[in-house]
């Protein structure tokens, strides 16, 4: 118990929202942290990179196709196997290619925007008790018993803060075109939290204490 008190003393430097305090009630607190992000920042950055690459590729292709029109020339392409040409004075045939290009560019911009949104979206509060992990964000509360976690944990320590990924026993099957279906477990992210190694140690201990299955010697992924 002294170990958990030490964690609380080092982390609990801010007051928790009243609604969250009410949910915790008389339960003891192993830790209380605020996550800076809803998911690891690297996931948001990868989405932004994909969006930028996609938009650049479509933009470059579209520029190569429509550039002759901007110079007063013509473009030639096939529509349903029929050779077609378009110009500024006869832009009708090029409307459909232009619409497709615009849609693909908007998809890329959407990926960039969504990645930026996720990178700025706050993760909310996480509180660990002897029996459960409580997540509080935008007045919404999610409580997950420790026995629902598989024990597969990924931790990344970046000095003053870090990321913690806790896999659940639940998940879903994802179909793949060029391979067998793959099972993807549900994950709870505590991203951008202080004292991530101490929190990881606390979570691992509680998961092990509440594990409904025999010990299998799980380790950090």
Image (tube, helix red, strand yellow):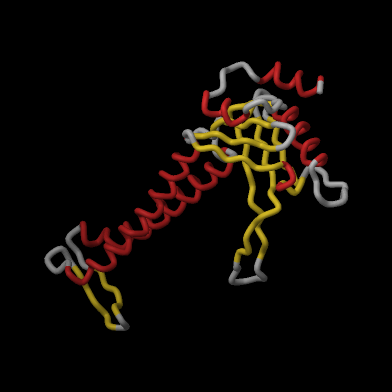
The image quarter in which residue 86 lies = bottom left
For the residue pair 91 and 15, the one nearer the viewer reads as 15
Q: Position of residue 13 (x, y in %)?
A: 62, 16
Q: Quadrant of the C terminus?
A: top right
For the residue pair 118 and 173, the one nearer the viewer reads as 173
Q: Position of residue 23 (x, y in %)?
A: 58, 31
* Residue at the spot 57% in from the left edge and 38% down from the top edge: 41
Task: Specify the farthest residue to the left.
Answer: 89
Task: Specify the farthest residue to the bottom.
Answer: 81
Q: Position of residue 197 (x, y in %)?
A: 74, 29
Answer whether residue 59 is visible to the viewer in this image. Answer: no
The image quarter in which residue 113 lies = top left
Answer whether residue 106 is visible to the viewer in this image. Answer: yes
Q: Position of residue 79 (x, y in %)?
A: 29, 78
For the residue pair 89 and 22, the one nearer the viewer reads as 22
* Residue at the spot 62% in from the left edge and 27% down from the top edge: 25
When the figure is inspected, residue 154 is found, relative to residue 176, above or below; the finding is above
When the figure is inspected, residue 190 is found, relative to residue 50, above or below; the finding is above
* Residue at the spot 27% in from the left edge and 63% down from the top edge: 99
Q: Is residue 137 left or right of residue 63?
A: right
Q: Is residue 62 left or right of residue 2?
A: left
Q: Is residue 189 left or right of residue 117?
A: right
């Amino acid at each position: 118990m002294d170990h958990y008190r030490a964690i609380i003393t080092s982390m609990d430097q801010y007051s928790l929202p009243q609604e969250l305090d009410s949910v915790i009630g008389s339960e003891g607190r192993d830790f209380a942290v605020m996550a800076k992000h809803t998911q690891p920042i690297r996931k948001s950055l990868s989405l932004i990179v994909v969006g930028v690459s996609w938009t650049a590729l479509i933009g470059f292709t579209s520029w190569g196709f429509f550039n002759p029109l901007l110079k007063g020339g013509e473009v030639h392409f096939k529509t349903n196997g029929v050779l077609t040409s378009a110009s500024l004075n006869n832009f009708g045939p090029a409307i459909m290619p232009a619409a497709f290009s615009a849609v693909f560019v908007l998809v890329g911009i959407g990926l960039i925007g969504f990645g930026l949104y996720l990178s700025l979206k706050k993760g909310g509060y996480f509180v660990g008790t002897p029996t459960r992990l409580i997540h509080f964000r935008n007045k919404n509360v999610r409580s997950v018993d420790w026995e629902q976690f598989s024990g597969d944990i990924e931790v990344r320590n970046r000095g003053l803060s870090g990321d913690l990924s806790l896999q659940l026993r639940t998940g879903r099957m994802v179909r793949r075109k060029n391979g067998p279906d793959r099972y993807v477990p549900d994950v709870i992210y505590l991203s951008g939290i202080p004292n991530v190694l101490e929190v990881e140690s606390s979570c691992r201990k509680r998961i092990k204490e509440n594990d409904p299955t025999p010990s299998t010697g799980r380790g950090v992924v």
